[in-house]
């Protein structure tokens, strides 16, 4: 009788272990949809980083304005995964009495890339293009020019866009 009970218990235990699946966890090393990496440069010295003071930014259609603390030389911006264009408004001296806001128009194509069962899909951005929206009055824009460094945005390891001011 004891052997029969032990056999049944072993059979149930074996069945339970066989029915288990491995855990699917999307680890931190699995990169999700990449964000746009932007660096700010001096228009007069194009090889020199130039910080932007009290920078505020928001995407067209978003209600939240984000403020970068102090002076920054790099900015990380998410792109819309549901559209082929994102417009950003960047305001220099946002906390002063004379803020200056410029608009960037970012265009791209999207490609869904399957990562694995745990992480699902991520979006890569192809044919990335950027241009600033220029005001009609001269010297109104604080952003003087932009330069696309990478037309394929598939990771956050490289800088994708230079902004000269």
Image: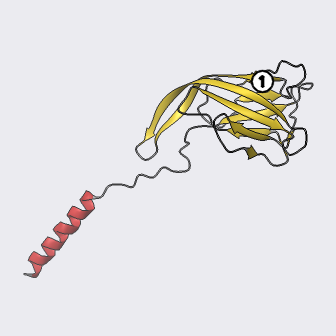
Between 66 and 8, the one nearer to me in the picture: 66
Circle 1 is placed at which residue position?
146
Q: Report whether residue 150 is seen.
A: no
Q: Quadrant of the C terminus?
A: top right
Say left or right for 49 vs 151. right
Name the residue at 39% across, 55% down. 23
Between 19 and 14, the one nearer to me in the picture: 19
Q: Report whether residue 155 is seen.
A: yes
Q: How is the image coloured?
A: secondary structure
Crowding near the residue tagged with mark 1, few <14, some 14–19, many ≥20 C-alpha atoms within 10 Å:
many
Point out residue 110 in the picture as x, y percentages from the top left corner.
53, 27
Say left or right for 49 vs 127. right
Image quadrant of residue 44?
top right
Say left or right for 146 vs 16. right
Q: How many marks?
A: 1
Point out residue 38 in the picture as x, y percentages from the top left corner.
74, 34
Point out residue 65 in the picture as x, y percentages from the top left corner.
72, 44
Name the residue at 56% across, 50% down. 28
Name the residue at 55% across, 31% down. 124
Q: Quadrant of the N terminus?
A: bottom left
Residue at disc 1, secondary structure: strand
Q: Is residue 14 above or below residue 75?
A: below
Residue that protrudes farthest toward the bottom in the picture: 2
Q: Is residue 11 above or below residue 84?
A: below
Name the residue at 55% across, 28% down. 83
Point out residue 156 in the picture as x, y percentages from the top left corner.
64, 37
């Amino acid at each position: 009788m004891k052997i029969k009970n032990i056999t049944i218990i072993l059979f149930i235990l074996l069945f339970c272990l066989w029915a288990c699946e491995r855990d699917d966890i999307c680890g931190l090393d699995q990169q999700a949809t990449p964000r746009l990496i932007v660096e700010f440069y001096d228009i007069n010295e194009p090889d020199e980083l130039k910080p932007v003071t009290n920078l505020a930014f928001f995407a067209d259609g978003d209600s939240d304005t984000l403020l970068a603390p102090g002076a920054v030389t790099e900015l990380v911006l998410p792109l819309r995964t549901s559209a082929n264009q994102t417009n950003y408004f960047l305001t220099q001296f946002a906390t002063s009495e004379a803020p200056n806001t410029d608009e960037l128009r970012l265009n791209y194509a999207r490609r869904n890339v399957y990562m694995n069962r745990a992480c699902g899909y991520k979006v890569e951005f192809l044919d990335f293009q950027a241009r600033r929206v220029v005001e009609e009055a001269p010297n109104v824009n604080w952003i003087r020019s932009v330069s696309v460094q990478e037309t394929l945005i598939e990771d956050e390891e490289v800088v994708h866009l230079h902004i000269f001011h």
